[in-house]
Amino acid sequence: AQKVTQAQTEISVVEKEDVTLDCVYETRDTTYYLFWYKQPPSGELVFLIRRNSFDEQNEISGRYSWNFQKSTSSFNFTITASQVVDSAVYFCALKPLGTDKLIFGTGTRLQVFP
Amino acid sequence: EPEVTQTPSHQVTQMGQEVILRCVPISNHLYFYWYRQILGQKVEFLVSFYNNEISEKSEIFDDQFSVERPDGSNFTLKIRSTKLEDSAMYFCASTSGDWGSYEQYFGPGTRLTVT
């Protein structure tokens, strides 16, 4: 089965705290792609990052960083020094090779309080 | 920066009516998609479209649904006879199709309310 699990339904933090959003995926494919999307209160889906299964390098972009570990089938997302504007629902998604679709997790709602 | 656009932003319709949701994908993209998100739930794949035909569809995408690219820019989703359970946010997405570049860019969504 191909599946994405985001066990954290909702996380609340105070501004400037670091927060990690967990994502665990299941696939039998050896080649696949992982994504994170942000859905702010306005409702659109904003692409944040893509990671290929054959590239296990972690990535940092400003306050955002991603930790991809094939051994544990996880692709976690950390926001450093969170800000109120980070408040949103964050979705992790999987795209196995050979399929067009993105398989989304159920999302984690992040609330950052001032 | 190019973006996917969708119209209308909100559509209210009565059960049994036909609706057409419209999307303009990013201009040089070759693959197009529709997803839906029932309120508070996860985003679900409906259909993908490439080279003027459906390349993949989910079990949600039954005979009530159809997609079309009537011209060089628009991509539409038609629901022939809407049901209450079709109420959802419908997202259009596109991707370039370049090798390794599989991220899909989403439009702002159309909220469909079936009464």
Image: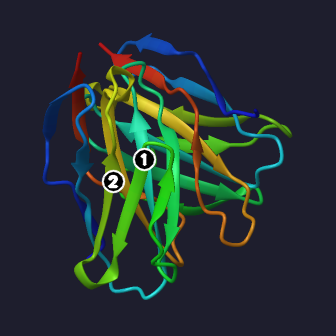
Asked whether the residues under marks 1 and 2 belong to the same chain, the reply is yes
Q: Nearer the viewer, residue A64 or B26?
A: A64
Please determine whether, in this image, residue B38 is positioned above or below residue A84.
below
Q: Residues within 10 Å of mark 2 (few under 14, many from 20)?
A: many
Residue B61 % position (x, y): 43, 50
User: What's the residue type where badge 2 is placed?
Assistant: Phe
For the C terminus of chain B, the quadrant is: top left
Which of discs 1 and 2 lies nearer the camera? The answer is 1
Asked if residue B2 can be seen in this view, the reply is: yes
Residue B27 % position (x, y): 82, 41
Q: Nearer the viewer, residue A107 or B45?
A: A107
At 77% across and 60% down in the image, what residue appears? B51
User: What's the residue type where badge 1 is placed?
Assistant: Tyr
At 20% across and 54% down in the image, what residue appears? A6
- Residue behind mark 1: A64
Residue A109 % position (x, y): 23, 35
At 30% across and 35% down in the image, what residue appears? A89
- Do the numbered discs 1 and 2 sit on residues whose CB atoms are within 8 Å? yes
Q: Residues within 10 Å of mark 1 (few under 14, many from 20)?
A: some
- Residue behind mark 2: A77
At 25% across and 42% down in the image, what residue appears? A18
Total numbered badges shown on the rendered structure: 2
Please determine whether, in this image, residue A72 is positioned above or below residue B110.
below
Q: For marks 1 and 2, give the CA distance.
A: 7 Å
Label 1: element kind: strand
State how the image is colored.
Answer: rainbow
Residue B64 % position (x, y): 45, 41
| Chain under numbered label 2 | A
Left or right of A70 in this view: B48 = right
